[in-house]
Amino acid sequence: MNFSLIFLFQILITVLFCIISVIFDVREGIVPNWLTVCLLIFGLVSNLILSIFSSNIKYILASIISAVITYAITYMMWQLNIWGGGDVKLFTGIASVIPFGLNVDFLHIFPELSVYPFSFSVVLNSILVSFPFLMIFLIYLIIKNNVFKDNKDFLFNMFNFSSINYIIESTFNKMVPVSDIKEGAIVNEYYFNNQYVCDLINENDGNLKIYKNDGKDTYFDYYFKSQSAGGITEKEMYLLRIMSAQGFISDEISVKISFPFTPSILFGLLIAVVYGDIIMLVTKNIFLVV
């Protein structure tokens, strides 16, 4: 049985799912659950078939272990606001399909193996290649929002704290009508005094969290905001719309402009498949030079 063909098929399907994820993420700002669930199921089923035909349990076992470990690690990163919940599920799906380095000999694909699961190479590669994407995204937002139109002095003082903070506040945050807010939106601090709003949000037990206001704006007793990069749930989206329609909160709310991370995941995957782990490759070359 030619396992190289099966490995190649797994790679192509994974890349295809990542491309579709990029399209959804860029257009809609969210990676659909059905997409990542389908990729996860494909990974488990394809590796189960490999185990059956090879009479070797390592494929399905590695698939399950890799998916569980990858989900646990990337979930913790999600809690630290590094990326969204859809990215966590996409990483988990990739881990289930490709649990360890692949050998597709007729294409001369011999990824540089690392001491950790293949999915970790994808995660690390994605983080490294995200920096150029982030810079391009930042420049695009600066141009789109005419950040320096009425603040030309910032062009000559871009590298002090106040200028950097101004750029971040001007480009990565925007006011949107509450009636247009979507699931996954990352809500910035919204200040209020109504105790009933506190009760509604606390009862919902979602991504929004109530905080006691002890800051400089003492006119308001409370504020709420998103706890993580996963953004608000669908239930919270409707809750905000209802509270706005009933006058408990204003008609507009500040949200963060989320950076689409899926293009970085796609490129991180392609690099991991063709070249391997960037960190391992750099480390190897440094030792060779030394």
Image (cartoon, rainbow, N blue to C red):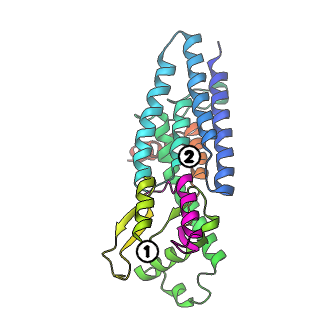
Q: Which residue is located at x 63 percent, y 53 percent?
A: 25
Instruction: State the image coordinates of residue 87 (x, y, percent, origin top left).
Output: 54, 47
Is tag 2's residue or tag 1's residue first in the polypeptide sequence?
1
Q: Which residue is located at x 57 percent, y 26 percent?
A: 103
Instruction: State the image coordinates of residue 233 (x, y, percent, origin top left).
Output: 53, 53
Does the magenta portion include 234? Answer: yes
- Say which residue label 2 marks: 268
Of the residues shown, which amino acid type is indicated by label 1?
Answer: Tyr
Residue 191 badge: 1
**Crowdedness near tag 1: few (<14), some (14–19) or many (≥20) residues, C-alpha within 10 Å:** many
In whole angstroms, how far apart are the C-alphas of marks 2 and 1? 39 Å
Of the residues shown, which amino acid type is indicated by label 2?
Answer: Gly
Q: Which residues are magenta?
A: 228-255
User: Which residue ends up furthest to the top in the rendered image?
Assistant: 55
The mark closer to the camera, 2 or 1, is: 1
In terms of image quadrants, where is residue 48? top right
Callouts 2 and 1 close, C-beta under 8 Å = no
Q: Which residue is located at x 52 percent, y 59 percent?
A: 131
Horizontally, residue 78 falls left or right of residue 212, namely right
Q: Is residue 164 above or below residue 195?
A: below
Residue 36 badge: none
